């Protein structure tokens, strides 16, 4: 009699465990590949003269640090002509529409004006 009760309790336990596993499972795997972040910049001049260079101070602040997350930026200049560099004043000019890796925290972009008229560029992170 004791053996039958023990076997019944064991069977009920196994069935309950299987039921919990079945209900708790979802066929879709929730993989998060996009993490919120914010990029802030210090104010910059509205107009530049030919040959003038301006430093654009930026801060990349992710909501949380996740190992393996990569941040990139690219730019497109749709008005005027100029050169954009990242890092230092002596660094190599960036190529429009190419992606460049940036690390979370503070970084500086340097824009050198090569045009006397109005200039516009868009930086995308």
Image (cartoon, rainbow, N blue to C red):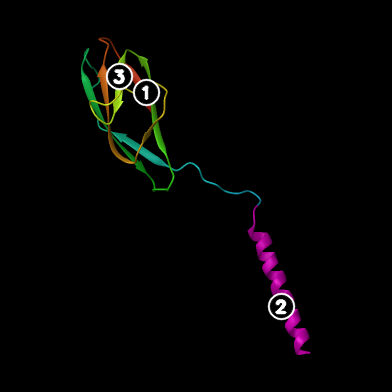
Question: What is the secondary structure assignment of the residue under circle 1?
Answer: strand
The numbered mark, 2 or 1, whose residue comes first in the sequence reads 2
| Residue annotated with mark 2 | 10
Question: What is the secondary structure assignment of the residue under circle 3?
Answer: strand
Q: Main secondary structure of the magenta part?
A: helix
Place of residue 1 in the rendered image (x, y in percent of width and height, measured from the top left): 79, 90
Vertical relation: 77 (above or below) 24? above
Q: Nearer the viewer, residue 28 or 72?
A: 72
The numbered mark, 3 or 1, whose residue comes first in the sequence reads 3
Place of residue 93 in the rendered image (x, y in percent of width and height, measured from the top left): 31, 22
Say left or right for 98 vs 59.
right
Q: Residue at x 75, y 80 (%)?
A: 8
Q: Quadrant of the C terminus?
A: top left
Please tell me the numbered disc located at residue 122: 1
Q: Residue at x 23, y 17 (%)?
A: 48
Please tell me the numbered disc located at residue 83: 3
The residue range painted magenta reads 1-26
Q: Residues within 10 Å of mark 1 (few under 14, many from 20)?
A: few
Q: Nearer the viewer, residue 82 or 92?
A: 92
């Amino acid at each position: 009699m004791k053996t039958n009760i023990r076997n019944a309790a064991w069977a009920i336990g196994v069935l309950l465990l299987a039921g919990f596993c079945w209900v708790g499972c979802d066929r879709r795997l929730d993989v998060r590949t996009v993490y919120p972040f914010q990029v802030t910049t210090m104010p910059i001049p509205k107009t530049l003269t030919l040959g003038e260079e301006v430093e654009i101070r930026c801060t990349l602040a992710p909501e949380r640090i996740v190992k393996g997350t990569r941040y990139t930026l690219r730019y497109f200049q749709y008005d005027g002509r100029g050169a954009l560099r990242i890092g230092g004043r002596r660094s190599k000019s960036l190529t429009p529409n190419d992606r460049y890796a940036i690390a979370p925290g503070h970084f500086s972009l340097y824009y050198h004006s090569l045009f006397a008229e109005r200039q516009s560029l868009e930086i995308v992170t």
